[in-house]
Amino acid sequence: MSLRDEIAEQPRVVRRLLDEGWPEARTLGRALAGVEHITLVARGSSDNAATYGKYLFESVAGVVTALAAPSLVTRYGAPPSYARSGAVTIAFTNRPQSKLGRAAEHVFALRAGAEREVAATKTYTATCVGLALLAATTAEARGRSALSLAGLEEAVQEAVDAGADAARLARAIGRAPMVIVLGRGYLYPAALETALKIKELARVWAEPYSSADFAHGPRTLLRPRTPVLLLTSRGATEGEARLLVTSLAGKGARVYAITNDERVAEKARDAVLLRAPLSETLVPISFVVAGQQLAVALARRHARDPERPAGLAKVTRTL
């Protein structure tokens, strides 16, 4: 199975989770109904998914959520005593019988099937969908409005089918040595993950920022003709994003977009325009799939083999 095959398999992974994952998520949601805060622990792409989970749990379920500092465990020998303190522990894993799965009180199985390629694609998407399911059921258990995942499979399929658009965007970006990747709100984690995939597969220095943080200082580094990839959707940040495209272009940047906002697509030099109806809360899942496609296409433009990213292995052991 190739990387493209694993990318193409993602709509089926989403469908499987939506068909099979709700009962498991409801059990776990009830377990989280009374918690005061949630701590998410992850590395790499999983850390980007956890950042998305933070947005979900805080906005949908109303639970203050933080990301742990794994180096406190691996380098400083100061592991938080989650289990000993009576905390609910849940492992999100594609292998429920793994050491991680056995260590946790509860397991949410990602059901992504074997992922053999080095770059995480369908396991990342499955983690995000699983977190969305858990945020929805936790909200429900806490008496809040639940999140609907209607339209998610179709939106992910649209992103899979957008390979030609992603290839066109890659041709426009060309062989630039650096790309700035911006997202805001729910799409900030998607910007992190898209930038990581571009780094891994194309070996291009892709620098991700929240578009708000970018305005606080890093934008002074912007040079004429620098490619900027903006991930933005209709909703709370659409007005700001439309102004940002104009502002960045006025400074000489070459602005591209992954978006469902036609006005942003019109203002940008080029865009992957995704039209499938989907809530602002969930678009990061489908947008990252389009970002995966772009990373593969950029790798080809740079004569890299995305199946064999240099210096990387499927499992990275962090001491």
Image (tube, rainbow, N blue to C red):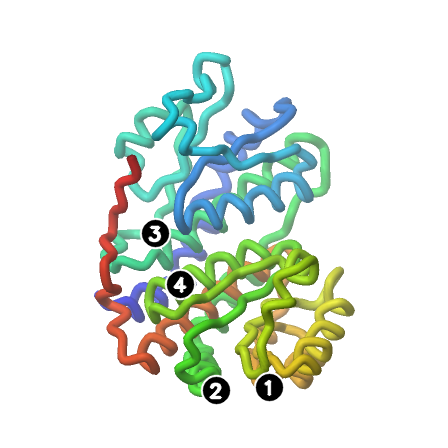
Mark 2 and mark 4 in contact (Cβ < 8 Å)? no
Residue that carries the numbered disc 3 in the rendered image: 112
Residue 211 figure quarter = bottom right
Residue that carries the numbered disc 4 in the rendered image: 197
Residue 15 figure quarter = bottom left
Q: Residues within 10 Å of mark 4 (few under 14, many from 20)?
A: many
Q: Answer yes or no: is residue 279 visible.
A: no
In this view of the protein, which residue sits in the foreground, 231 or 129? 231
The numbered mark at residue 172 is 2
Amino acid at circle 1: Arg
Mark 2 and mark 1 in contact (Cβ < 8 Å)? yes
* Of the image marks 4 and 2, the number of the one nearer the N terminus: 2
SS at badge 3 = loop
Residue 106 in the image: x percent, y percent?
A: 42, 27
In this view of the protein, which residue sits in the foreground, 164 or 219? 219
| Image quarter in which the C terminus is found | top left
Residue 41 in the image: x percent, y percent?
A: 45, 35
Circle nearer the viewer, 1 or 3: 1
